[in-house]
Image (spheres, helix red, strand yellow):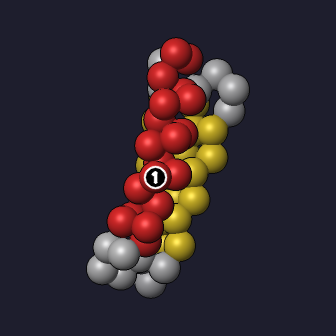
């Protein structure tokens, strides 16, 4: 098992749409082979991290 941490930066006008899309894709993300846990953390400026445990 390992964790992958991926930093990212969103444009401020895309944050709401991206958050909504991530929530709608959560079941598909969790169904990927080997995924045990998936977390997305984002600050109000659009910078964040995706953390997945595989």
Q: Is residue 7 visible?
A: no
Q: Left or right of 26: which side holds 28?
A: left
Residue 7 position within the rendered picture, expressed as x and y whole percent measured from the top left:
48, 42
Residue for point 54% across, 39% down = 19
The one of 1 and 15 positioned closer to us in this rendering: 15
Query: Mark 1 = which residue?
Result: 24
Task: State the residue lying farthest toward the right.
Answer: 44
For the N terminus, give its image quadrant. Answer: bottom left
Q: Position of residue 20 (x, y in %)?
A: 52, 41
Q: Position of residue 3 (x, y in %)?
A: 48, 69
Secondary structure of residue under mark 1:
helix
Asked whether 11 or 8 is in front, the reply is 11
Viewer can see residue 17: yes
Residue 23 lies, in percent from the top left, at 52, 52
Residues 49 and 25: in front is: 25
Question: Which residue is most to the left?
Answer: 33
Q: Looking at the rendering, in which quadrant would you find the C terminus? A: bottom left
Above or below residue 43? Residue 52 is below
Q: Is residue 19 left or right of residue 33?
A: right
- Residue 27, by quadrant, is bottom left
Dot 1 alpha-carbon crowd within 10 angstroms: few under 14, some 14 to 19, many 20 or more: few
Q: Is residue 10 positioned above or below 20 on the image?
A: above
- Identify which residue is drawn at 52% across, 65% down: 38
Report the residue at 32% width, 73% height from top.
32
Question: Dividing the picture into quarters, in which one does residue 42 lie?
Answer: top right
The residue nearer to you, when weighing 3 against 38, is 38
Question: Across the whole image, how many numbered discs are drawn on residues?
Answer: 1
Q: Residue at x 52, y 59 (%)?
A: 51
């Amino acid at each position: 098992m390992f964790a992958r941490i991926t930093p990212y930066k969103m444009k401020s006008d895309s944050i709401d749409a991206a958050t909504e899309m991530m929530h709608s894709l959560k079941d598909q993300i969790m169904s990927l082979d080997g995924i045990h846990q998936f977390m997305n953390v984002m600050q109000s400026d659009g910078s964040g991290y995706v953390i997945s445990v595989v």
